[in-house]
Amino acid sequence: MGDLIPTRVPARLAVLRHPYEDVELIDTTWAPAEVPAPGYALTWWLADGDAQELEFQWLYERPPGLPLLIVLPPAREIRKVFALLGSLTALEPRAILPAGRLAAPNRLRDLLATPPRRFADAVSAYLVRRGLLKTEEIRRNVRAIFQAVPAVRSVSGLAARLHASRRTLGRRFADAGLPVPSHWLQFARVLHVAMRLQTDRSPLSRIAGQYGYPDAFTLSNQMKRLTDYRPTDVRRWLGWEWLVEAWLKREAESGGIDSQLHGSSVWAYNRRSAGPAATPPTRR
């Protein structure tokens, strides 16, 4: 498609994925081959609000871990999508872009690799939308964990920051049916590192040291254990939502997420994709 994405594309929907040199046009029958879909993003060009209601509904129900980039029509045609403009925030887009060079594949790639300005707020808000953070207290705690990293590296330090004992903090997360605080802290560090790796080509050992890891080997092993991916993967596959989903999947499989409290949030799409045989594991 060259340097510019045309305003009018046949399907008006596309998937952007590695190597991020172009977009692949799709329609509402498309589904990712794997969940989470590492480094995938969806792009939607607005052209005719009355004709795009089916696409809107499909995007609203899209699998988790797929960030959405919306491209507006040129100013002279914006009236055609007035009916949709007021509802776009319901799709929770990563960005809403004007038509033109800002919607070229290389710009979309850069946008996907750039962490949100308020990263802790974005991650906690994503988990709220996923239905996992059900109380205001647990939302504050999770947001505080992502804000504390990398300065805080121990559960004791985290508990002190949250003005709670380690036992009290652990009970809060257990009562919420969520992974233990140490797992949240470990993953928060890994996620911060992942976003750094996507914009910084420094040696892994240098970045590992800045985040409190003794060496690159330790960082790589912990990322693999928590998410099943390594630093080379997160440098190749951009974005962060898919890595959150990879961690949730690992926690669910190991019993770190209460299936009775969160089964509909964590496993719903996997059950729909894999059929009746895919059932939530029992929490240990």
Image: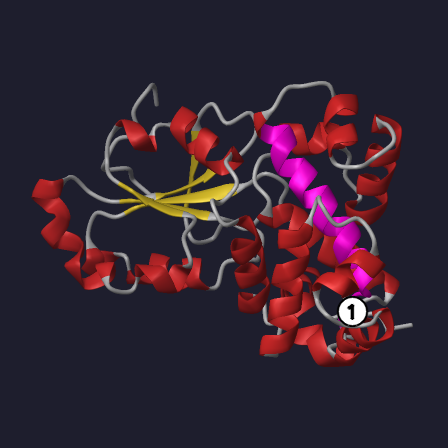
Using residue 145 as the reference point, say whether residue 12 is left or right of it.
Answer: left
Q: Is residue 180 left or right of residue 97?
A: right
Considering every residue shown, the one lying at the far right of the view is 284
Could you say where residue 16 lies in the image, as x and y percent from the top left? Answer: 48, 36
Left or right of 226 in this view: 105: left
Residue under pointer 1 = 257
Q: Is residue 187 magenta?
A: yes
Q: Tag 1, which secondary structure? A: loop
In the picture, residue 146 is in which quadrant?
A: bottom right
**Is residue 223 in the magenta section?**
no
Residue at 78% x, 65% y is 159
User: What amino acid type should be assigned to the residue bearing mark 1?
Assistant: Ile
Quadrant of residue 25 within the rendered picture: top left
**Quick check: can you spot residue 33?**
no
Location of the N terminus by quadrant is top left
Side (left or right) of 223 relative to 52: right
Residue 241 is situated, as x and y percent measured from the top left of the image, at 59, 49
Which percent across, then down, holds residue 14?
41, 40
Is residue 30 shown above or below 102? below
Q: Foreground residue, 112 or 62? A: 112
> Which span is picked out in magenta?
178-198
Q: Residue at x 77, y 34 (%)?
A: 230
Q: Residues within 10 Å of mark 1 (few under 14, many from 20)?
A: many
- Residue at image position (68%, 44%) is 191
Query: At 79% from the left edge and 72% from the top edge, which residue is drawn?
Result: 169
Q: Is residue 210 above or below residue 185?
A: above
**Majority secondary structure of magenta residues:** helix
Q: Nearer the viewer, residue 213 or 76?
A: 213
Q: Looking at the image, can residue 124 be seen?
A: yes
Specify the quadrant that holds the C terminus.
bottom right
